[in-house]
Image: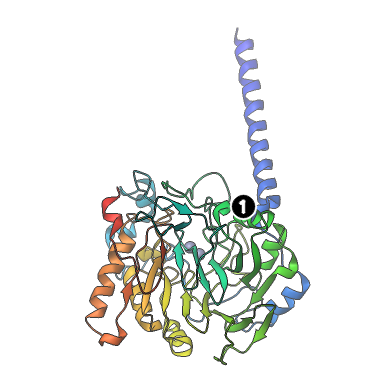
């Protein structure tokens, strides 16, 4: 009997060791070879990376000293409440309301017919009825679709989990979750950096398979990821900070970052700095660049913040390229503990004033649970901060806030301002 028990224990131990080995090997293979982790830069890009004045020989560096988190710094208590400083507790016992409890009411992607008062009904699809000049649609988080100078543009197209594995980063449930299949042809795809909530490898593969993209504009080092996922090399242009490109109707060409004159049909994009970091793997962070984008057309001037902490660079960008007709401003996934790399809503509002933005569209909220705050807090706080800021500036410097629902088509002369999040739970 004892012998039999010992035999069972022996086989159980063997089984457990084998299980651990299989899991370890599987994890190693996944981390080493899964396409979601992207590729390594080619020789041409490596030369450009090494020549960049923002590269220190190993990684890219921010314009001002920046900590990705202050979790490792014991004496950072300024402005951090005891509640916020105990980050481990917040992760183990997350506060309620980080995720909506019901699907968020969003609009089916498409344009309302003239006869329809309800945007949710009688839609014309964007594939058959593209956006008109000056129309914008927020698709949740940092994805904004818009049309300028006869070109359809999107920022950071993300439609799946903001995670490399099937755990974490699940998008909030929506009544009409935007899908790649519903998108029109996109002439210009702007990528801010290679984090999972901004560079979605499944979406990139779908966009390429469905032949929906004209050209990708990406930070230095990010082309390797796109190429690994099937994007032809010739369809990607990489940028260092303050590099610009003029996109004529026929072919993109290098442009001066300071020359502001634009032909009728031209669009100019400028890759501008942000205070952030990058990386899709456990190792090798900051080996690709991160940033924000300025998009200029003869009729409208647009800014897309990407991700980043607050810095004086917003005022520099505003000085060089502002005023902006609309700024898509990061507002969400913040915490005092990583304030250097993600602005608090009050800082997002201040950055809007620094940029000389006429309209601010809060982005980086409403789709993913990536911090410890309530899902509605980013928009509530920025709304208050903008209202307060407006009382301290002259009328012509005041900011209007655009708060569309996900999927709602809007223009700058008819901004959506409904506080729709207050009626969602
Ligand atoms: Zn990021
Ligand atoms: Zn982000």
Q: Within the image, what quadrant is residue 326 found in? A: bottom left
Q: Nearer the viewer, residue 266 or 215?
A: 266
Residue at image mark 1: 202
Q: Nearer the viewer, residue 335 or 236?
A: 236
Q: Position of residue 217 (x, y in %)?
A: 62, 72
Q: Position of residue 78 (x, y in %)?
A: 30, 71
Q: Within the image, what quadrant is residue 371 found in? A: bottom left
Residue 325 visible from this viewpoint: yes
Q: Secondary structure at mark 1?
A: helix
Q: How is the image coloured?
A: rainbow
Q: Residue at x 48, y 75 (%)?
A: 275
Q: Residue at x 65, y 41 (%)?
A: 24
Residue 65 visible from this viewpoint: no
Position of 212 compared to 182: left or right? Answer: right
Q: Within the image, what quadrant is residue 253 found in? A: bottom right
Q: Residue at x 35, y 54 (%)?
A: 118
Return the residue found at the far right.
43
Q: Position of residue 34 (x, y in %)?
A: 68, 50
Quadrant of the drawing holding the N terminus: top right
Q: Residue at x 30, y 87 (%)?
A: 396
Q: Nearer the viewer, residue 228 or 32?
A: 228
């Amino acid at each position: 009997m004892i012998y039999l028990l010992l035999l069972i224990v022996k086989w159980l131990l063997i089984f457990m060791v084998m299980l651990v080995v299989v899991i370890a090997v599987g994890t190693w293979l996944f981390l080493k070879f899964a396409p979601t982790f992207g590729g390594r830069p080619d020789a041409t890009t490596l030369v450009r990376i090494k020549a960049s004045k923002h590269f220190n020989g190993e990684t890219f560096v921010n314009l001002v000293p920046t900590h990705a988190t202050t979790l490792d710094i014991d004496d950072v208590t300024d402005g951090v409440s005891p509640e916020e400083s105990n980050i481990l507790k917040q992760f183990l016992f997350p506060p309620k309301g980080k995720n909506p409890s019901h699907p968020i009411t969003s609009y089916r992607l498409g344009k309302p017919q003239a006869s329809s008062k309800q945007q949710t009904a009688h839609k014309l699809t964007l594939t058959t009825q593209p956006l008109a000049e000056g129309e914008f649609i927020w698709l949740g988080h940092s994805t904004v679709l818009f049309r300028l100078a006869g070109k359809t543009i999107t920022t950071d197209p993300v439609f799946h989990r903001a995670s490399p594995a099937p755990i974490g980063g699940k998008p909030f449930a929506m009544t009409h979750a935007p899908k790649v299949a519903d998108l029109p042809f996109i002439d210009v795809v702007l990528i801010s950096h290679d984090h999972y909530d901004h560079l979605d490898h499944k979406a990139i593969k779908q966009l390429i398979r469905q032949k929906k993209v004209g050209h990708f504009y990406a930070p230095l080092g990010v082309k390797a990821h796109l190429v690994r996922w099937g994007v032809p090399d010739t369809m990607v242009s990489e940028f260092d900070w303050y590099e610009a490109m003029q996109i004529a109707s026929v072919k993109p060409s290098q442009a001066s970052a300071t020359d502001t004159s634009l032909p009728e049909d031209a669009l100019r994009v400028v890759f501008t700095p942000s205070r952030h970091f990058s990386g899709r793997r456990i190792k090798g962070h900051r080996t690709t660049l991160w940033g924000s984008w300025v998009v200029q057309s003869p009729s409208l001037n647009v800014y897309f913040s990407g991700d980043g902490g607050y810095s004086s660079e917003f005022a520099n960008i505003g000085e060089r390229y502002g005023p902006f007709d609309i700024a898509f401003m990061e507002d969400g996934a913040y915490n005092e503990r990583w304030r250097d790399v993600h602005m608090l809503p009050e800082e997002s509002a201040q950055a809007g004033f620094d940029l000389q933005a006429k309209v601010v569209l809060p982005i980086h909220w409403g789709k993913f649970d990536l911090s410890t705050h309530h899902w509605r807090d980013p928009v509530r706080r920025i709304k208050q901060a903008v209202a307060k800021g407006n009382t301290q500036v002259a009328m012509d410097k005041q900011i209007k806030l655009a708060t569309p629902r996900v999927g709602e088509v809007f223009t700058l002369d008819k901004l959506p301002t409904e506080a729709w999040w207050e009626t969602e739970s």
